[in-house]
Image (cartoon, grey):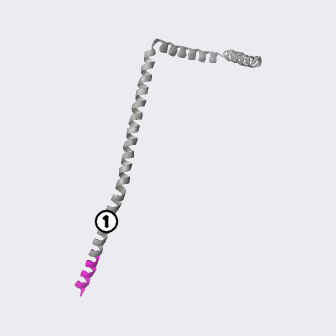
């Protein structure tokens, strides 16, 4: 047990030492100073105005809920239309076959009349 405690203790001391050594560089110190100022500003803003964050979270949740409802409605609508198409497809196929047959018979009759009519006119 004591070895684990010493391990984590060594890790912590090493991290602190590494951080302290990295702060010897002036640009690193300036960057850290800016980051600390930004973070502390944001933290103080959250602490001073918790209602603001709460309102943003509620607004985002409402948008997500509305979007989810809209997607659900759209999927339901599309599903209903697909079902309608599935039901209509055999009927449409039958109508198309009947129409094709009617036109085919009509065209055959017309061709026969044209052929026979031309032969009669020639004789």
Q: Residue 61, relative to residue 83: is it above or below?
A: above
Judging depth in this view, the residue of 118 and 8 nearest the camera is 8
Label 1: state its secondary structure: helix
- The rendered magenta stretch, by its main secondary structure, is classed as helix
Tell whether position 113 is magenta.
yes
From this viewpoint, which residue is outermost toward the left?
121
Question: Is residue 24 among what the camera can see?
Answer: no
Residue placed at 59% from the left, 14% from the top?
Answer: 33
From this viewpoint, which residue is outermost toward the right?
3
| Residue range corresponding to the magenta coloring | 110-123
Q: Residue 115, relative to residue 20: is it above or below?
A: below
Dot 1: within a 10 Å radius of its alpha carbon, few (fewer than 14), some, or many (20 or more) residues?
few
Residue placed at 36% from the left, 56% from the top?
Answer: 89
Q: What number of labels is visible? A: 1
Tell whether position 71 is magenta.
no
Judging depth in this view, the residue of 123 and 72 nearest the camera is 72
- Residue 34 screen position, x and y as percent: 56, 16
Residue placed at 43% from the left, 17% from the top?
Answer: 52
- Residue 102 screen position, x and y as percent: 29, 68
Q: Which residue is mark 1?
A: 98
Question: Is residue 95 among what the camera can see?
Answer: yes
Horizontal placement of 30 versus 78: left or right? right
From this viewpoint, which residue is outermost toward the bottom?
123
Q: Quadrant of residue 27?
A: top right
Horizontal placement of 60 versus 26: left or right? left
Q: Residue 75, relative to residue 67: is it above or below?
A: below
Judging depth in this view, the residue of 1 and 40 nearest the camera is 1
- Residue 83 screen position, x and y as percent: 38, 49
Q: Quadrant of residue 2?
A: top right
Task: Say which quadrant the N terminus sits in.
Answer: top right
Task: Say which quadrant the C terminus sits in.
Answer: bottom left
Residue placed at 52% from the left, 15% from the top?
Answer: 43
């Amino acid at each position: 047990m004591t070895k684990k405690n010493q391990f984590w203790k060594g890790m912590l001391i090493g991290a602190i030492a590494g951080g302290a050594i990295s702060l010897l560089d002036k640009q690193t110190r300036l960057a850290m100073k800016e980051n600390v100022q930004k973070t502390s500003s944001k933290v103080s803003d959250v602490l001073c105005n918790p209602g603001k964050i709460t309102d943003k979270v509620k607004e985002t949740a409402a948008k997500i809920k509305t979007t989810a409802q809209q997607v659900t409605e759209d999927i339901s609508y599309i599903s209903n239309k697909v079902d309608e198409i599935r039901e209509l497809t055999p009927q449409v196929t039958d109508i198309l076959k009947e129409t094709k047959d009617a036109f085919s018979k009509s065209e055959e009759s017309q061709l026969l009349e044209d052929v026979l009519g031309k032969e009669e006119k020639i004789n």
